[in-house]
Amino acid sequence: MKKVLFVVNNLGMGGIQRVVTVVSESLVNDYNVKIYSHDKVDPFYKVEEEVVFGEKNIFEKRLNPIYLGINVLYRLVFKKKKTLINTHVNSLCRYLEKNPVDTVIISGPSVVKASVIKKRFPNINVILWMHNNHKVYFEGYFSKVKDSLIESMQAADTVVALTEEDKRGYGVISENVVKINNPITLDNLGLVSDLNEKIISITCRYDIQHKGLDYLVKIAKKLPEDWKIAIAGSGNTQEIDALRKLIADEKAEDKILLRGALEGEQLLRHYKDSSIYIMTSRWEGMPLVLAEAMSFGLPIVAFEQSGSSEVLDDGKYGILVENGNVEAMITELLKLVENPELRKIYQRKSLERVQNFKVEILQKQWQNII
């Protein structure tokens, strides 16, 4: 039986962590699967597989601040968009030396160091799982280490993109790019909304810039008096305070319900007891929450970006609005708010589309590259 190791930064709350646990669990009957977490964070989601935590040696722990300084100096002096020293990858390599595997599937920050792993372990099948939009990776998250990311993509045996747009974008760098959609990660227990509640739901981290929550607050103010927007999610103290201040500054306290981070039955009710799902993100990889909402039969209205376009099949299964166009978003929402029959039409579209994101279907695509 092949040995497969999923690599993540940590197993806390987050979209990457959730989808990694679901996909890895779907493969346990066919492979010996483990999850390797660089940081020792208790799993937020249920994990059936064995979890291995990375271990820095005593020198790495003591010298880590110096290593960070060396990396900054290296980039400034040599004008290289690379990281010279990465203690996370060093720890992973030590683990692989003692615990050989057949396939390593890397998510998160370590994708920039896959070339190091491939060089030291040429017989390992190295897969990079790119969880976000290619422009965001190259111009945002990994802009300072872009050269390392390119090297790693070219060294990897396979690069997994989540959308057609990102497959094309990453395909400029690597010839080994495949598209595998993210699966539904929430069991809705067969629950479907009756579309009668005057609630528009959204599930996201309280990241104002990324999730477009500045747009969301403006939209909420324009809704009919008896309609509200309910947000399931959370963030760090700074993010929570910033969102509360934004809502207060816009005098939208009576239009927005902050439900906090939800799971289990509470999360199911969050979706079921709403009638429309909204997404205001400026960018996304492939948003798990859209598929979750669609599984409850919620009509979707989303700002257009690569993730929402993929899930909604360019507007065939939901309403796409020009990104950042608040007035257009309000117009489309009001059409659904005022027309229950239109909500039912889009409910049928959601329930049809979501069948494509069942883990049993996507599992076979993973098996093809493992």
Image (cartoon, rainbow, N blue to C red):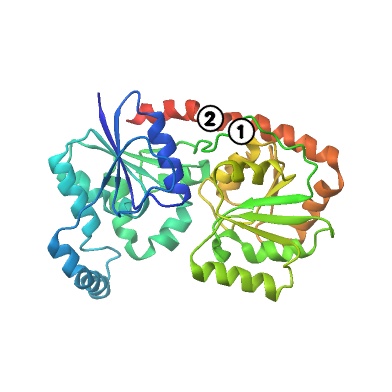
Q: Which mark is residue 263?
A: none
Residue shown at the point (58%, 45%) measured from the top left: 289
Is residue 303 something that shows in the picture?
no
Q: Please tell me which residue lies in front, 39 or 172.
A: 39
- Give 311 or 175, whichever is nearer the viewer: 311
Residue at position x 41%, y 61% in the image: 141
Check the image and report above or below for 249 versus 200.
Answer: below
- The answer to whether residue 121 is left or right of residue 303 is left
106 lies left or right of 135: left
Placement of 164 over or under 83, stated as above or below: above
Q: Position of residue 62 (x, y in %)?
A: 17, 69
Which amino acid, by three-letter code, is at mark 2? Lys
| The N terminus sits in image quarter | top left
- In the image, 330: left or right of 81? right
Q: Is residue 344 left or right of residue 36?
A: right
Give the labeled residue for mark 1: 354
Q: In which quadrant of the rendered view does residue 292 lie?
A: top right
| Residue nearest the observer in this picture, 247 or 189 | 189
Q: Position of residue 199 (x, y in %)?
A: 75, 50
> Is the C-beta separation of discs 1 and 2 under 8 Å?
yes
Inter-mark Cα distance, 1 to 2: 7 Å
* Callout 1 secondary element: helix
User: What residue does disc 2 label?
Assistant: 358
Number of disc labels: 2
Q: Amino acid at mark 1?
A: Val
Taking 187 as reference, is 97 above or below it?
below
Q: Where residue 48 sits in the image (x, y, percent)?
A: 37, 35
Report helix, strand or loop for mark 2.
loop
